[in-house]
Image: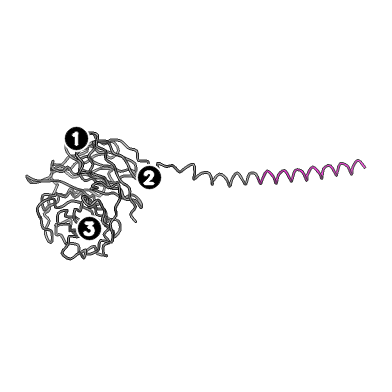
């Protein structure tokens, strides 16, 4: 009789243990499932990729370019300061203090981590370390008496700078690793072919094909886009099918993404989206991008599916307290 009671108690104990184990397992499963659901809410935040990124008051920006990761750089027409910011957070700080000459167009070379800056009327091309802001080299370009070194693009072979007051561009040959040339190696190449110099600002924004075999230059006053042989300067007008009307009036900074060229039209407060053909010799303005926050944007940089245009605010008298910003819009 005692033996049977012991067996009954043991069976009851095992049954209770199994029920407890099943309950514990169910609770653990619920916790594991709940953790991933909670993570996105914790990771998200209202400050991720803000639509407006403030620059320092009185900065007077003109150029912008994308660096490593979500980093961007903007240059100051007022004194040549370079601001280094982050698209993701909207935060940043001045990387290069004022150097007493304007910073206009900018380009970044990931091989060397160098930042190339067009010097406007100073006739200079500056190169900075993108991490420290240290000035690596300053080139006196072989410019004429009237000049405006406006924009720059970096390819695997060279850095190319436009001049808005002369039918020519300047070339800084680069090594395969992005090493800088001696000052004696800087070249001047005349624009020819279809390119015609007119009164006012001419060559402005400049871009290149991914392999660097061709350049694109927009003529602001003529409102035309050109395909240029980097070695010879021979320019072919890209047929955008607008008849006698200039297709890209007030064309400023340009950005190539695949076969799509984004052209900032500063005074029009818009970005033209140009769909180019397979050989880039023709295309059409498919649409324009507008935004209520645009206030005479001048140049544009890309990051993923986003475009970032810098507001130069040329119609607003510049003061030490005038506000400036970078505006985010979608590429689509």
State which quadrant residue 236 falls in.
bottom left
- Of residues 180 and 285, the one drawn nearer to the viewer in this rendering: 285
* CA distance for labels 2 and 1: 30 Å
Secondary structure of the residue carrying numbered label 1:
loop
Labels 2 and 1: the sequence-earlier one: 2
**Which mark's residue is nearer the viewer, 3 or 1?**
1
Q: Residues within 10 Å of mark 2 (few under 14, many from 20)?
A: some
**Which mark's residue is nearer the viewer, 3 or 2?**
2
Q: Is residue 104 above or below residue 320?
A: below
Residue 104: image x %, image y %? 20, 44
**Which mark's residue is nearer the viewer, 2 or 1?**
2
Q: Which mark is residue 99?
A: 1
Residue 113: image x %, image y %? 28, 43
Q: Residue at x 19, y 39 (%)?
A: 317
The chief SS type of the magenta part is helix
Q: Is residue 133 magenta?
A: no
Q: Residue at x 14, y 59 (%)?
A: 234
Q: Residue at x 27, y 44 (%)?
A: 112
Q: Residues within 10 Å of mark 3 (few under 14, many from 20)?
A: some
- Of residues 280 and 324, the one drawn nearer to the viewer in this rendering: 324
Task: Give the residue at mark 2.
Answer: 49
State which quadrant residue 276 falls in.
bottom left
* CA distance for labels 3 and 1: 34 Å
Tell me the quadrant of the picture where the N terminus can be found.
top right
Secondary structure of the residue carrying numbered label 2:
loop
State which quadrant residue 76 falls in.
top left
**Relative to 32, 98 lies left or right:** left
Task: Give the residue at mark 3.
Answer: 213
Q: Is residue 13 magenta?
A: yes
Labels 3 and 1: the sequence-earlier one: 1
Q: Which residues are magenta?
A: 1-26
């Amino acid at each position: 009789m005692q033996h049977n009671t012991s067996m009954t108690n043991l069976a009851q104990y095992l049954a209770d243990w199994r029920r407890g184990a099943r309950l514990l397992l169910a609770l653990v499963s619920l916790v594991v499932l709940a953790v991933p659901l909670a993570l996105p809410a914790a990771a998200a935040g209202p400050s991720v990729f803000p639509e407006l990124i403030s620059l320092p008051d009185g900065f007077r920006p003109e150029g912008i370019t994308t660096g490593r990761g979500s980093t961007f750089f903007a240059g100051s027409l007022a004194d040549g300061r370079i601001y280094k910011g982050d698209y993701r957070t909207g935060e940043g700080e001045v990387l290069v203090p004022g150097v007493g000459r304007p910073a206009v167009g900018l380009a970044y070379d990931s091989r060397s981590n160098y930042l190339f800056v067009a010097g406007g009327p100073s006739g200079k091309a500056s190169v900075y370390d993108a991490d420290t802001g240290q000035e690596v080299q300053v080139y006196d370009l072989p410019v004429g008496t009237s000049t405006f070194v406006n924009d720059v693009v970096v390819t695997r072979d060279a850095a190319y700078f436009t001049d808005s007051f002369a039918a020519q561009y300047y070339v800084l040959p680069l090594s395969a690793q992005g090493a800088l040339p001696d000052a004696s190696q800087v070249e001047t190449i005349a624009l020819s072919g279809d390119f015609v110099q007119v009164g006012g600002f001419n060559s402005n924004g400049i871009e290149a094909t991914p392999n660097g075999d061709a350049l694109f230059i927009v003529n602001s006053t003529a409102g035309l886009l050109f395909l240029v042989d980097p070695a010879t300067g021979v320019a072919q007008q890209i047929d955008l099918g607008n008849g006698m009307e200039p297709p890209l009036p007030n064309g400023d900074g340009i950005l190539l993404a695949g076969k799509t060229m984004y052209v900032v039209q500063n005074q029009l407060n818009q970005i033209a989206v140009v769909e180019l053909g397979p050989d880039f010799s023709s295309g059409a303005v498919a649409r324009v991008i507008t935004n209520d926050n645009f206030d005479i944007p001048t140049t544009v940089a890309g990051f993923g599916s986003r475009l970032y245009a810098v507001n130069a605010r040329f119609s607003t008298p510049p003061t030490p307290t005038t506000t400036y910003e970078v505006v985010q819009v979608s590429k689509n």
